[in-house]
Image (spheres, grey):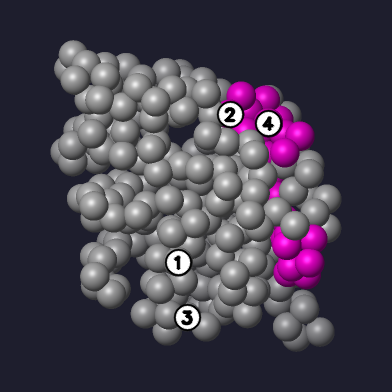
Amino acid sequence: MQSHTARVHDIDMRWEETGSGDPVILVHGIPTCPALWRDVAPLIEGRRVIAWEMPGYGASIPEGRDRDISVAKQADYLVDFLQDQGIERAILAGHDLGGGVVQIAAVRHPGLVSGLFLTNAICYDSWPVPLVKGVAMAGSILEHAPDGSLHKLMEIMFSKGHETEAAAKAALETHWPHYDKHGGAEAFVRQTQSLDNEDTKAIADDLPRLGIPARLAWGADDEFQKVEYGERLASDLNAPLRRIEGGKHFTPEDHPRIIAEEINTLIRTVDSKVHG
């Protein structure tokens, strides 16, 4: 994938891109970045694949300073990005916070969204999870904690969210450097303090009326986003849910082939609707 940056309104927005054709937009969560999708994107067939970086996360952590980086506002930023890129319609896919972002974008701008894919996504009142909520409440305590405290916390998050220690280690090596370079605990606290489940609760009643082709895949053993929430989402979206037995939270990293298979199936569904 190739890295790109564009000035959108007053934000330097960054994304990774590969392929060509109608776009599929991939949105990461916390504490990750577009590299979450590094093994998924090459497996998506016949599409321009864009892994968009939320302002305030990843290499774009500096763009989050003195700016609203709530999930609801990220949906606005995503729509601004699509419009800036001349993208009139796209399949949106989201993991974790990114799942909340794409739900909100779809409800607010259904004409922009041709399909919706969600994997272990925040929804309703499923979030913030206790660990993240604790960081938000502790705030300055973590910011002034001894060096290495945030690294250890991230290590715990990835260990709980991955099926193997090797995968957890690879995720830490992939995502940690952005925090190490751009403010560490201060950046992570800023992210956690922006989170409010009113953002997804506010659109919950609109989900059943969306009428957009959708699919879900869910790690059934996720401690952070329980599969029961995925089942509720699937019901509201009138969409199939693929349970990944033994799967945990970071499904795009642990099960890229399954995630890509489901996105490719959604692409075919969307295409058949367009050409049918």
User: Going from the N terminus, do you reach mark 4 or mark 1 first?
Assistant: 1
Mark 1 is surrounded, within 10 Å at the Cα level, by few (under 14), some (14 to 19) or many (20 or more) other residues, namely some
Q: CA distance from mark 3 to mark 2?
A: 33 Å
Circle 3 sits on which residue?
87
Query: In x, y percent, where is residue 151?
Result: 28, 22
Secondary structure under badge 2?
A: loop
User: Going from the N terminus, do you reach mark 3 or mark 2 first?
Assistant: 3
User: Going from the N terminus, do you reach mark 4 or mark 3 first?
Assistant: 3
Q: Is residue 201 magenta?
A: no
Residue type marked 4 = Lys
Circle 4 sits on which residue?
226
Q: Is residue 209 magenta?
A: yes
Circle 2 sits on which residue?
224
Residue type marked 1 = Asp
Front residue of this view, candidates 256 and 273: 273
User: Going from the N terminus, do you reach mark 2 or mark 1 first?
Assistant: 1
Quadrant containing the N terminus in the rendered view: bottom left
Mark 3 is surrounded, within 10 Å at the Cα level, by few (under 14), some (14 to 19) or many (20 or more) other residues, namely few
Query: In x, y percent, where is residue 70?
Result: 43, 51
